Amino acid sequence: MKPNKTSQFIALGAVAVLAIVFIVTQTSLLSVITSSPWWMYGLIIGILFSGYMWVKTMKEENEADQEWIEQEGNVYMARLEAAKARREAQQK
């Protein structure tokens, strides 16, 4: 596993643990579960899933951007080499 991915998992796990610790220390966990409507849990799961998908999409977009930048750099370098070859051919 890559170091960046490992640190993301550690950060996500830390946030989850902190949220659970906060809920357990501030209230009786059973009273929170029984007093909250069921759709609140769906909302929380949806928010977490949305955040996960946002991070995943950002990572994919950054990789695609880097690939495009690399391709454009290769095109530019090829143009420079062609121009250099033309200049050398003209000087001979």
Image (cartoon, rainbow, N blue to C red):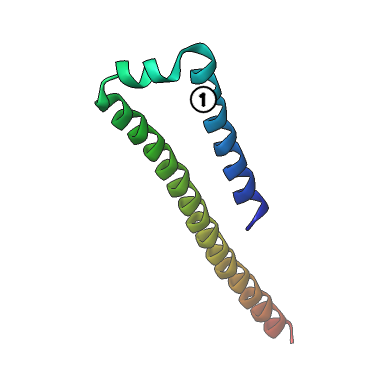
Q: Which residue is mark 1?
A: 19
* Residue at 31%, 15% in the rendered image: 35
Q: Amino acid at mark 1?
A: Ala
> Residue 49: percent from the left, percent from the top?
38, 40
Q: Residues within 10 Å of mark 1 (few under 14, many from 20)?
A: few
Using the rendered view, name the quadrant where residue 85 is placed: bottom right
In the rendered view of the protein, which quadrant contains the N terminus? bottom right
Relative image position of residue 91 (x, y in whole percent): 73, 82
Outermost residue on the right side: it is: 92
* Image quarter of residue 81: bottom right
In front here: 35 or 73?
A: 35
Residue extending farthest top: 26
- Where is 28 relative to 58, above or below? above
Q: Is residue 32 above or below residue 54?
A: above
Task: Give coordinates of residue 11: x percent, y percent.
Answer: 60, 37
Please indicate whether residue 52 sits to the left or right of residue 37 in the image: right
Does residue 45 sit above or below 73 in this rendering? above
The front one of 60 and 21 is 21
Given residues 43 and 65, the one toward you in this image is 43
In the rendering, at what x and y percent does residue 9 appear? 57, 44
- Is residue 77 rendered to the left or right of residue 22? right
Q: How many marks?
A: 1
Q: Secondary structure at mark 1?
A: helix
What residue sits 62% from the left and 41% below the top?
10
Residue at 48%, 58% in the rendered image: 64
Q: Where's the C terminus, which quadrant?
A: bottom right
* 92 and 85: which is toward the camera: 85
Toward the front, the furthest residue is: 30
